[in-house]
Image (tube, grey):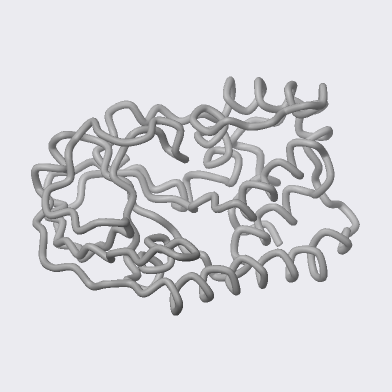
Amino acid sequence: MKKIETMKRIYHGSENRIEKPIYGFGKKYNDYGLGFYCTETIDMAKEWAVDADQNGCANIYDLDMKGLTLLNLNGPEYCMLHWLSVLLQNREFDCTSLLANEAREYLTDYFLPDYSSADLIVGYRADDSYFSFAQDFLNGTISYRQLSAAMHLGKLGQQIVLKSEKAFSQLTFVDTEIAKAEEWFIKKQIRDKNARREYFDMERNKRQRGDLYITQILDEEMKADDERLRPNIS
């Protein structure tokens, strides 16, 4: 983790206008646990804000990042298994197979970063499609390379999550933009549909020689310093 000194414009999609987010409030079973989940893209916040028949709000904030510690799970010092281990600790996975349960235990034992002192976490957002990609990897259906590639399908981007009281105190509300359900829910559906189609058309049936599967990671007891797990795997 590192400390940074800059101002960042971020957005939060919600049913309501939120001028002052409350530290310690929310759902604890989100991707990275309890926190305030934001994006650096206002269009993405509008997609997150709406339901089929419910308008939403894209709340706009300026975050003073001076002195805050950032855990960037997409940084070069981390690999996809670090991200997945954090997800496994917080989300409710349906690990029905013996392989998936073994994988869950191994990844949380050897790849889970210490994020207890992080003010901010940056990483992928596990929407429904992306969550299913992770489950397929745990069940041995897709390779590590395919999982890494799948996280870029649909151009979901990354989220920034405020985790600490200090981070909340350095957040300033700017404004709210209304997100109309008839516009943004369709866009959200299209993004999800495109990601699933690309996944099945381009990734799930596209095994490459030398692909690394969870069974090999477990059998060889691979650790985070293994070069085969580096982020530039293709």
Q: Nearer the viewer, residue 93 or 217?
A: 93
Instruction: Note whether 10 is above or below 102 in the view shown.
Output: below
**Which image quarter is the C terminus in?**
bottom right
Q: Residue at x 75, y 69 (%)?
A: 197
Expressed as whole percent of the image width and height from the top left, the position of residue 98 reads 82, 22
Instruction: Note whether 7 is above or below 72 in the view shown.
Output: below
Q: Is residue 169 left or right of residue 129?
A: left
Task: Give the total of numbered labels.
Answer: 0
Expressed as whole percent of the image width and height from the top left, the position of residue 221 reads 73, 25
Q: Is residue 193 left or right of residue 6?
A: right
**Which image quarter is the N terminus in?**
top left
Expressed as whole percent of the image width and height from the top left, the position of residue 130 reads 62, 53
Q: Is residue 159 left or right of residue 203?
A: left
Instruction: Note whether 32 is above or below 20 in the view shown.
Output: above
Q: Residue at x 54, y 49 (%)?
A: 126
Q: Nearer the viewer, residue 55 or 68?
A: 55
Q: Residue at x 27, y 62 (%)?
A: 11
Residue 225 picture quarter: top right
Expressed as whole percent of the image width and height from the top left, the position of residue 13 reads 33, 59
Looking at the image, the residue that sits furthest to the front is 53
